[in-house]
Image: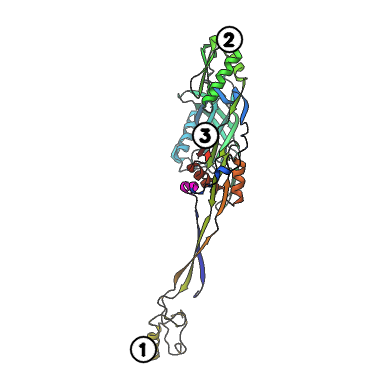
Amino acid sequence: MAGGILRLTTYTVRAFTLRKPAALMGALLCAGAGLLAPAAPAADTNRDVMVRDITSVQGVRDNLLVGYGLVVGLRGTGDTQQTIFTVQTLANAMQKMGVLITPGTVVVKNVAAVFVTASLPPFARPGAKLDVTVGSVGDARSLDGGVLLMSALHGPDGQVYAEAQGPLLLGGYSAGSGTNRKEVNGANTATIPDGAIIERDTAVDLSGFKTVSLLLHNPDFATATDIAEAVNGEFGKLVATALDSRRVDINVADATSQTVPQLIARVQNLTLKVHSPARIIVNERTGTIVMGGNVKLSPVSVIHGSLSIQVVTTYTAAQPGLLPGAPPGMYPNAQADYQNGAQGQGQRQPGQQQQGPQQPGAQQLGFQPVLPPPVLVPETQVNVNDGPAQSMKLDEGANVDELVSGLHAIGTTARDVVAILEAIKAEGGMQAELEVQ
């Protein structure tokens, strides 16, 4: 083992130069910006949409349901005995069936406690069916092959609105055990198509509506005003008013003598032009960037460089206190021990094995110096690679395509682009809303 090399640690540190370049961006703006060629006229980013696609009717919405239940029929992949509430739930279910059991004496592996969730759509009537999602609560390994027993689904008010039951449908699988295990998409969540039946009427009575309020999905004063004008133009009189950037009210009595559903259908089928806001969505965790085509940039120069530092630590096995120039295994007192052995003062213990090299003649004298265990001596090497800086210049009115093409040309990665976009936004060279998730 002496002189052997063991590589134990290797790590890399990355540093980017564009973390806070607001001042740098201003200094890098071309002095001759006024000589740049005039930008091409901006393309019309307005698009025709229907009112139904950008609004919803206030009071007409889904309601969330949740319940607790028991899944049976698993193939030994259910909750373990440590999951106490599963055994208690099983005992309660058996008691309702007329069978009394003691929870402490029950050991089953084909049962799992689950939460059941569903979404109750508007105007749902009793007898209609819902899709439900089932998720494990305890430590079950898989819900494959299980069947959900009848479970009540409650609304926010605590009332029961549906009952769920049926065989589970998994979107993944889990096979094997220990280190030899393969799992795809998770096996502790499943669905039951049409697995719940609605028991309570939640339909909204539209006949009592005096005002129909349209709520915009994306708040915008211009869009709300355009919707009100489109509705007023459709009915030929003032019936709609934009209250703010998200809400437009329509007076039912002034609009028409038709029913409220007919009024809503007529309004939702109206078409108008909507301006898409300039927005960039950045996810720093995954490096995902989504940019609209109408994002514009001011004249800006970008200098991007990378510094790569690689630290490699290796360990060499050596004896502690090794004498300079001495053979491997010789420590500072070895020479004296050897001399003592040569004079007959040293003795080798009975049955003691040889633990290291010795000088010629030591074995004949019957003396073997006892060597300390070897130690690992670290040796660290630092390699620094400072690549040349890459530059890119954008003219007035540059769009997203030019930005992305330029960033790819200088060899940036997705995470580099995130830092560059934040820097350009801080410098004021981006006419768009930057949303970092």
The image shows a total of numbered marks equal to 3
In this picture, is 164 found above or below 285? above
Q: Are marks 2 and 3 in contact (CB under 8 Å)?
A: no
Q: Is residue 260 visible?
A: yes
What colour scheme governs how the chains and residues are painted in the rendered image of this protein? rainbow
In the rendered structure, which segment of residues is drawn in magenta?
18-26
Question: Which residue is pictured at 59% across the width and 10% down the height?
Answer: 258
Query: Whole-Å distance between the Cαs marked 3 and 1?
Result: 81 Å
What residue does disc 2 label? 256
Provide the secondary structure element on which disc 3 rests: strand
Q: Is residue 186 visible?
A: no
Q: In this rendering, which labeled residue sits more in front, label 2 or label 3?
A: 2
Residue 273 position by quadrant? top right
Q: Earlier in the sequence, mark 2 or mark 3?
A: 3
What residue does disc 3 label? 70
Residue 40: horizontal and vertical position, in percent? Answer: 63, 37
Q: Amino acid at mark 1?
A: Gln
23 part of magenta stretch: yes
Which residue ends up furthest to the left in the rendered image?
345
Provide the secondary structure element on which disc 1 rests: loop
Q: Dot 2, crowdedness within 10 Å: few (<14), some or many (≥20)?
A: few
What residue does disc 1 label? 345
Question: Which residue is pictured at 54% across the width and 13% down the height?
Answer: 239
Q: Amino acid at mark 3?
A: Leu
Q: Earlier in the sequence, mark 1 or mark 2?
A: 2
Q: Earlier in the sequence, mark 3 or mark 1?
A: 3
**Looking at the image, which is closer to me, 156 or 161?**
156
Residue 405: horizontal and vertical position, in percent? Answer: 62, 46
